[in-house]
Image (cartoon, rainbow, N blue to C red):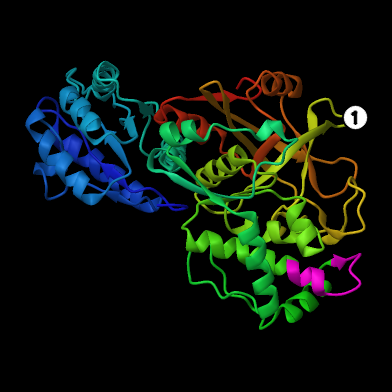
Amino acid sequence: MTGSIPRMGLCPIGKFVFSNEDAIRDKQLLQTKLREWGVDFVDLEGVLEDGLVKDQRHVEVAVEHFRRAGIDCLFMPHCNFGTEGAVGMIARKLGVPTLLWGPRDEAPLPDGRRLRDTLCGLFASSKVLHKLGVPFTYVENCRVDDEQLRKGVDTFLRAVSVADALRNGIRIGVIGQRIDFFWTTIINETELLDRFHVELLPLDMVDFLNGLRERRKRGTPYQFPTSEIGMVSLFSSYEAEVADLRQRCKVEGFDTDGPLMNVLAARDEMLALAEAHALDGLALQSFMSVVDAAGAYCTYAESCVCERLPYGAETDVHGVISDLLLRRAMLGSAPAYVAEFTTRHPENDNAVLLWHAAAPLSMCDPDDTPTIGHHWILPSPLSGMLHFKLREGPITIARFDGDHGEYRLAVGEGHTVPGPRTLNNYVWMEVGDWPAWERALMQGPFIHHCAMGYGHFAEALTEACKYVPGLEAVRLGGR
């Protein structure tokens, strides 16, 4: 399910009272809408009469059907009233994220009779879900054609995609040890495994560097199998790829092509390890062992990796998790990137600089040309740092972090604004109330690293925390 739309179990709810004909009609209208929206769903047609749960005796039949179908989430639209006991038992037995909604009722008939009391049934079912300890998402009572429903279903599916990562398991490769002076990236590996099903795979730095050297000797880009992280190289040799790179980017500080070929070999070794070990993400001790061995900063290699899977420099495992969760909210439509909050805008009190290295090239501003050049902070004769402005657009920020057994997901939204030029990968972001963001981040347990992606997905990320025990959402800016 990684990067794709979750499979939904559509479990329409009716009741022996009120109009069965209306319940069938509303179920069919909803099925049509879900197909229009491209939702992957499994319903109860041919399983229960009228494809509706109308009695508690239907519980086991519905549960077994949805289990066989391998659903990731459950949608329980109330089509005329609600059989609340069945709603609660089905949702509890399946144990997947659950969506509750019902169509808005029409006016009573001229004689005063009502064909549906959908809203009333929803109140009853929500109480039973609370009673049974079943978390659920609710879309307010509205008509099937209302934008509110489409948006609600979309947000729910994105939230399911996020939550399933921490419910079903993540495997992250960690190349090298934590950099000694980066105390901010100290993590509790046992808690991550026990509470959030995050498995860390240690990858020895010496083995990694030996693999890099072997690839460099062979001189041919690795041809990856077809997969989510794979790629098929367009080049027959590293020499040919370096020549192309010099055409596409401003390359400075390389007297020979050897170090650049080492950078490409580092990229291929990282992606090959991810392929071989079925990794969902990678964290790298990005300096100085790799830099010294390659004779260059390997930022372009990291950028290529980040294009394909969640990546965290400076051994930031929580950063990788943040990146992965944001990509899940985006349903794999584009990469995210672990940036840093660095400095406030010199003139805009609600804007801040998002900055770091190794952003995916797909995030480059179309009016800028990437530069591979020297490090502007650390004094070094070596080149290889990636410099370009990030493109404009709406932005979502996410940071998974925790200390002392308390874990939170900080989530916020902003939009790019003009600002001064700087180096490495950067963009200026404006939010509604930066001082409120700053206070929330300072009070922790967060650090300066944050995953950023284009688009607004804060609502889905926030809702996902409802389905991950022990993870609290923090809406930056208080919204």
- Measuring from the top left, give residue 353's x and y in whole percent: 80, 37
Q: Amino acid at mark 1?
A: Glu
Q: Residue at x 64, y 49 (%)?
A: 176
Q: Label 1, on which residue? A: 347
In this image, 153 relative to 68: left or right? right
Q: Note whether residue 146 is visible.
A: no
In the image, residue 259 lies in the stretch drawn in magenta: yes
How busy is the neighbourhood of tag 1: few (under 14 within 10 Å), some, or many (20 plus)?
A: few
- Measuring from the top left, give residue 167's x and y in whole percent: 39, 38
Q: Residue at x 56, y 38 (%)?
A: 457
- For the record, the magenta segment spans 250-262
Which is more toward the observer, 126 or 112? 126
Q: Residue at x 71, y 54 (%)?
A: 363
Helix, strand or loop for disc 1: loop
In the rendered image of this protein, does residue 214 appear above or below residue 81?
A: below
Which is more toward the observer, 362 or 173? 173
Quarter of the image with the C terminus in it: top right
Which quadrant of the view contains residue 85? top left
- Measuring from the top left, give residue 473's x and y in whole percent: 53, 25
Q: Residue at x 83, y 50 (%)?
A: 424
